[in-house]
Image: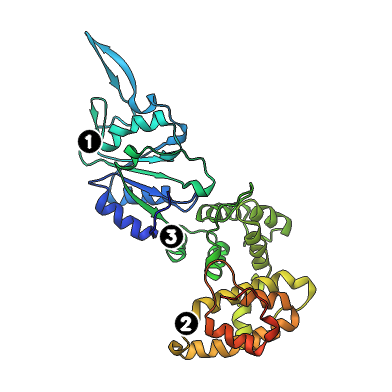
Amino acid sequence: MNLAYSVTQQELLEILLNISPVRPVFIWGAPGIGKSALVEKFANEVGLPCISLLGSQLAPEDIIGIPQIKGDTSEFLPPKMIARKEPYVLFLDELNACSQEVQKAFYSLIHERRVGEYHLPEGSIVIGAGNRSQDGAIVKTMSSALINRMFHVQMTANTDQWLTWAYENHLHPWVIEYITQRPDHLFSEPPKNEEPYSTPRSWHMLSDALVEYGAGDNKLPESVLRVLAYGCISPQHAGMFLAYTKQLSNRHLLSDIIKGTAKWPSKPEDRDILYFTAQSFRAKLIHELPQSKQKMNKEAQYLDHRAKALIKELSQINHEIAQMVVSAQEGDMLPDWFLVEVIRDLPRLANTGNNR
């Protein structure tokens, strides 16, 4: 399923607070964007314990329990994990990864909040979650009957909200600063081949690895940093993260270049630093230049003026990297008016794929 509209973590939290007490909610989203963490945060906010069941690892009896003979009849005894006396949040993770038989076992639990003769305590909340088929995860088609019993919402990663969470949870400062500079690297679509890729979860994993190795307090060999980065995040992002760690001794390089107190790195051995700095420069232009030239303030006017001169200088050092700054890429684009003026002054950069 791919819903027409997606919500951020904070918007989803509001939906859960208002809808899940009266209707079961199903959260769709790519692996690693924080669905499970958000449900746990929601449970904490409403003051209820959160019990998680992983659909891909369940059998029907894990839900409906086992039969017990009582006199002339029998009844099913639900699992201890579910059969609680106090209200709680029941989180059915990877619900669309379980078998059809397990999905059937969830029907009454989701629709009527009961398992056999056992009813969930008054005030309990049921939330499901799962990945989409386009994410390359293990998913099975949910029956229309099960889909129709839930309110559906699709979650997307939001960089600003994730950075707030990262500060609150003391993630490694290198990860926080890198994502601050390159917010477009927080999440990448799952690759078709089997390799790590960037998600909020994988950046958290890289942060944990950096903390365990004492990165920042101790000088880690580049070989170790390479293993850590390429083992957690997308290869392209890992290479740029390594470039970022190399220029930590001059972490304000881009600001100094824009001010005119520093130059683009031009030595052959600094190629990766040049590439990272140029990518950060592109991200800054996308973020700070308005789509309409008439809406520019003084800061944007200064950045516009300096940017054109810096792109010219960059093209003299490395034409391909200068083209990358103004090229069409997935995601956000540079403003059209800015591109027109750059190409007018530097026609050699025109072959960038920006024919829009």
Q: Residues within 10 Å of mark 2 (few under 14, many from 20)?
A: some
Q: Are marks 2 and 1 in contact (CB under 8 Å)?
A: no
Q: Earlier in the sequence, mark 3 or mark 2?
A: 3
Q: Quadrant of residue 262?
A: bottom right
Residue 208: image location, x then y, percent: 56, 52
* Amino acid type indicated by mark 3: Trp
Q: Earlier in the sequence, mark 2 or mark 1?
A: 1
Residue 121 numbered tag? 1
* Cα distance between the residues tagged 3 and 2: 28 Å
- Residue 261 visible in image: no
Give SS at disc 1: loop
Q: Residues within 10 Å of mark 1 (few under 14, many from 20)?
A: some
Q: Identify the residue under disc 2.
A: 290
| Residue pictured at 50% horizontal, 76% vertical | 287
Residue 214: image location, x then y, percent: 62, 56
Closer to the camera: disc 3 or disc 2? 2
Q: Does residue 276 lie above or below 261 as drawn?
A: above
Position of 319 with respect to 85 (left or right) is: right
Give SS at disc 3: helix
Residue 165 numbered tag? 3
Which residue occupies the extreme right position in the image? 268
Give SS at disc 2: loop
* Amino acid type indicated by mark 1: Pro
Q: Does residue 297 lie above or below 58 as drawn?
A: below
- Residue 160 visible in image: yes
Q: Residues within 10 Å of mark 3 (few under 14, many from 20)?
A: few
| Residue pictured at 55% horizontal, 60% vertical | 172
Quadrant occupied by the C terminus: bottom right
Which residue occupies the extreme front position in the image? 355
Residue 337: image location, x then y, percent: 53, 85
